[in-house]
Image: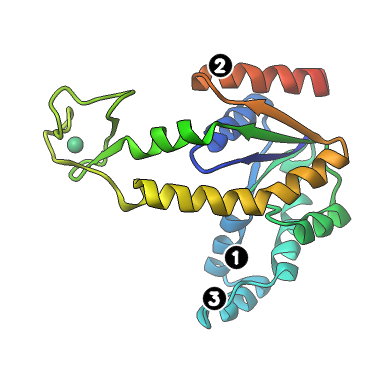
Amino acid sequence: MKLIVLGAPGSGKGTQAKFITQKHRIPQVSTGDLLRDAVKRKTTLGVKAKEFMNTGNLVPDAIVLDLLKGRLMKDDCLHGFILDGYPRNIAQANQLAKITDIDLVINISVDYGLLVKRITGRRTCKVCGSIFHLEFNPPSKVGICDKCSGELFQRSDDTEETVKKRLNTYENQTKPLIEYYSSQKLLQTLISDGTIKEMRHKVNDLLEKTFGS
Ligand SMILES: [Zn+2]
């Protein structure tokens, strides 16, 4: 079960990936986490990566790929894995194809209007960090946290302008990947228009259909 999960920020991709890791006991592999970990442990690749980070440069694809290769060879990946945040472009997808095959790419598709509504309606408590939503999970008193009576505010990440910018970037980045995996008949698109639980069922059905488990 070698999976890639694609989905716009706010699509619930992370939540679904977590469900899959729990149900099928395969790890979620994030290149961001791998990099941070290698840097922290000062491995050979980590030290190299740090040099690029220190000078404000992107870590070269070759280093990320080496890290990934090492990670996918570990025992817990024997029955599969979910790739998170990788590949981000065709070049990376081509490199990935050289180190492993992929069985399925799940594309979680959400209506952007709905996404913007979901994200821009979020309000966070300044004190305890609890998250509410103006429409889907409103606090009992406007602007006040139910748990600690702290003040609620909108994080700068959650404003309409930021959200639209992020969605735009995502769209431009991912479109070629969707075409790439679609042409290889690996892509399955699931529309997320209901609850997390409904989406979970759709994902389970797809995995069952694909892997018979
Ligand atoms: Zn609070």
Which quarter of the rendered image does ligand 1 occupy? top left
Q: Residues within 10 Å of mark 1 (few under 14, many from 20)?
A: some
Residue depicted at 65% across the width and 41% down the height: 6
At x 56% / y 69%, what residue is drawn?
A: 39
Amino acid type, residue under disc 2 in the picture: Glu
What whole-number distance in Å separates the C-alpha atoms at marks 3 and 1? 13 Å
Closer to the observer: label 1 or label 2? 2
Write down the residue under mark 3.
53
Quarter in which the C terminus is drawn? top right
Which of the two labelled residues, at mark 1 and mark 2, occupies the earlier sequence position? 1
Q: Indicate whether 141 appears above or below 48.
A: above
* Front-most of residues 141 and 43: 141
Tell me which numbered mark, 3 or 1, is placed earlier along the sequence.
1
The answer to which of marks 2 and 3 sits earlier in the sequence is 3
Front in this rendered view, residue 74 or 94: 94
Q: Position of residue 109 (x, y in %)?
A: 61, 32
